[in-house]
Image: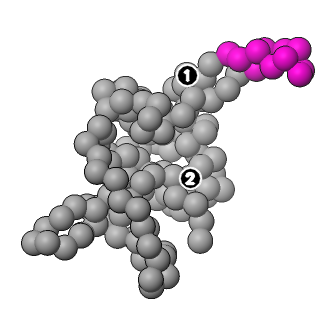
Amino acid sequence: MTKSRSKIQVQIKDGELHPVTLHDAQQIEEFSQGTVFNITRTAQRSNPQHNLYWATLAKVCKSTGRWPTSAHLHNELKWACGYVRMRWNSLASAHMRMIDSINFDEMDQKEFHEYFDMAMEKLAEAIGHDPLEI
């Protein structure tokens, strides 16, 4: 199984857990029967928007063939959008550019929304059309 780049989100409906989005359902299907999960209640950030981001990247990779994986495209988008910081590497005695994380603990909803809009704009420029309409 490939490592997921987003958390799976489920919600309680009629006393049962159900995937929130199609992307969540697809991720759940990748696990074998009997897999146990630790569930944490969350409300900090929009998981549906986060999952839309990853689902869009996967569709773009599949339809264009320009990036080998969603993770490759993700890193390129963060770089293109300026989500990088300078760090001093004492072992190399040099400054290095490090790509920021969009992890839920690193980026709140407002910042992720701004990043999402910018990333979709950069992606539209790269592929020639709105990536959300693939």
**Residue furthest out toward the left:** 14
* Residue at mark 1: 82
Q: Tag 1: Cα neighbours inside 10 Å, few (<14), some, or many (≥20)?
A: few
Residue at the image point whose x is 63% and y is 47% from the top: 72
Residue 74: name its quadrant.
top right
Along the line of sight, which residue is nearer the eye, 129 or 32? 32
Q: Position of residue 20 (x, y in %)?
A: 25, 61
Quadrant where the C terminus lies? Answer: bottom left
Residue 99, compared with residue 48, is above or below; it is above
Give, as a three-letter code, the residue at label 2: Ser
Q: Residue 8, relative to residue 43: is it above or below?
A: below
Check residue 90 for magenta coloring.
yes
Q: Which residue is mark 2?
A: 70
- Residue 57 versus residue 25: which sits nearer the camera? 25
Q: Quadrant of the N terminus?
A: bottom right
* Residue 27 at x, y percent in the picture: 43, 68
Mark 1 lies on a secondary structure that is loop
Q: Which residues are magenta?
A: 86-96
Q: Is residue 41 magenta?
A: no
